[in-house]
Amino acid sequence: MTTTQTETPEQARRAAMEAKIADLHAEQDKAVEAGGKYVARHRERGKLTARERIELLVDEGSAFLELMPLAGWGSDFAVGASLVTGIGVVEGVECLIVANDPTVKGGALNPWSLKKSFRAAEIAEKNFLPTINLTESGGADLPTQKEIFIPGGRGFRDLTRASARKQPTISVVFGNSTAGGAYVPGMSDYVIMVKEQAKVFLAGPPLVKMATGEESDDETLGGAEMHSRISGSSDFLAVDEHDAIRLARRTVARLNWRKAGAVPTEAYAEPDLDPEDLLDLIPTDLKEPFDPREAILRIVDGTGPGNEQPFDEFKPLYGSALCVGWAKLHGHPIGILANARGVLMSEEAQKAAQFIQLANQKDTPLLFLHNTTGYMVGAEYEQGGIIKHGAMMINAVSNSKVPHLTVIMGASYGAGNYGMNGRAYDPRFLFTWPSAKSSVMGPAQLAGVLEIVARESAEKKGQPFDAEGFVAIKEMVETQIEEQSLPYVLSGMVYDDGVIDPRDTRTVLGICLSVIDNQPIEGAMNFGVFRM
Ligand code: COA
């Protein structure tokens, strides 16, 4: 990072992070504005947008934790993937809400919408949440149907499996929901259809005419009145969109929902240190070292009754490149594992494995804070058993049964991403800071490895190695890997649940921990065989 003469390192870090946050907002705005000119047409039709429907559905003044808003970023499809999803509180009940955005390609679902909706269903399942679908979609995105038609069936399967697990599902149909889409209300426990707007049929009038020769119209085939009075596929006939949302809220109010987890009742103190300072402290240049305790003390509950010390570090003198310890967040006890220096060595891996077992023994959720370049390489470390010790940590992470939360603060490279509970290890929620980067290794290292491999390959073939010519290739690879490791790319691919402003971390994690409390926490009694 370059600093001007008058700029302190704190000011330089803040300026760099603020620039990244401004970029983040600009990218998130793309999802909000994805409908473009179709938003005005939608309103002229007297309809509410997906976000307005959600806003009216959730309790006034409550937070809506939007998830995966950047899905599809960098693809041929609109940012957000024609869906808005997240966790909202309806009549005091935390619900997973999925709303089609009918202003984006008629709400048609593309491959990214599928990834996003599958992840949303997984969040509902793992955290035991009721699901509310705000339905208005042109079904499959027809040009990419081969990528979505067959896997897409899972969406309907997930709905009925949720119902069987006693996780209620509600579908509010605001418009088109035809062909496969008809199975969204079809498979839901409670269905509300909006008068003169809902269209729910397996085939519309033209297709019926072609298939059977029968003349029909939308209303007779699949209107809200017909389904509410004749077919019984709708449980409630809403006179308009506001009435539909009111009926959805009444339905949730009657779910008799009780959280089965240990909901904290004690008051908690805000952090001892101001979360605002995070912008002065977190380097956006990942080569700059950063003490995660500075972040921890600005995320967890501060000193107060029942919390005499905000963070009790465990094994502080051993494996000091990984900082682990106990804290509370919004009154929920948590264990934290945070990279203090980039690299993970045998001691850190063993310490992590021990700590994860302790959290399981006391049924305590874990928070992983990433800033790692991966496990240490080199003869000394290989001989010291870095593979088996890394495997120990990965074993513990994989078989741990307490809920895991992950925040990628900075670097997340190589197997460090796995050991620290990256996306493939099923954290309940995974968020990324705008300063994060993730790939198999750093761009410069990867390009350097490619050069060595190319040089050795040329030698084996007895050919000269064009070192000068390789400079351009190396630069190109470095740029490409750098671009691919950025948070928007990873978020676009649905490798996280969202990129967040570091200052919001406490609030976001607090919502997640509250959601987790829908079920009791039961730590693992068994792990895989630890190679000693
Ligand atoms: N796949 C791909 N693109 C679709 C689509 C789909 N299933 N449905 C709509 N679109 C596109 C339209 O081509 C149009 O694109 P354009 O802006 O490039 O012209 C855009 O979305 C808006 O569509 P439009 O028809 O103007 O919107 P509408 O609000 O008046 O009607 C629908 C929306 C969904 C009712 C209507 O588009 C429709 O009937 N689509 C086909 C539905 C279908 O049969 N799906 C297959 C089910 S598996």
Image (spheres, rainbow, N blue to C red):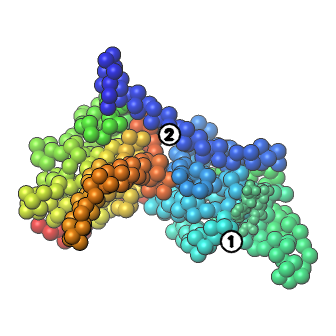
Residue depicted at 87% across the width and 78% down the height: 209
Q: Residue 181 appears at what percent x and percent y?
A: 69, 67
Q: Is residue 317 left or right of residue 255?
A: left
Residue depicted at 11% across the width and 43% down the height: 317
Q: Quadrant of ligand 1?
A: bottom right
Q: Which residue is mark 2?
A: 24
**From the Cβ of disc 1, is ligand 1 less than 8 Å away?**
yes
Residue depicted at 27% across the width and 55% down the height: 467
Q: Residue 151 appears at what percent x and percent y?
A: 56, 72
Query: The residue under label 2 is which amino acid type?
Result: Leu
Location of the C terminus by quadrant is bottom left
Looking at the image, is 161 positioned above or below residue 272? below
Disc 2 to disc 1, how far (Cα)?
A: 35 Å
**Residue neighbourhood size for the residue with mark 1, other residues' Cα within 10 Å, grouped as few (<14), some (14–19), many (≥20):** some
Q: Which residue is mark 1?
A: 180
Q: Quadrant of residue 268?
A: top left
Instruction: Kindly tell me whether residue 274 is visible in this rendering.
Output: no
Secondary structure under the numbered disc 2 in the rendered image: helix
Secondary structure under the numbered disc 1 in the rendered image: helix
**Residue neighbourhood size for the residue with mark 2, other residues' Cα within 10 Å, grouped as few (<14), some (14–19), many (≥20):** some
Which residue extends farthest top? 6
Looking at the image, is 55 positioned above or below residue 129? above
Query: The residue under label 1 is which amino acid type?
Result: Gly
Closer to us: 353 or 288: 288
Residue depicted at 50% across the width and 53% down the height: 492
Q: Residue 447 appears at what percent x and percent y?
A: 30, 54
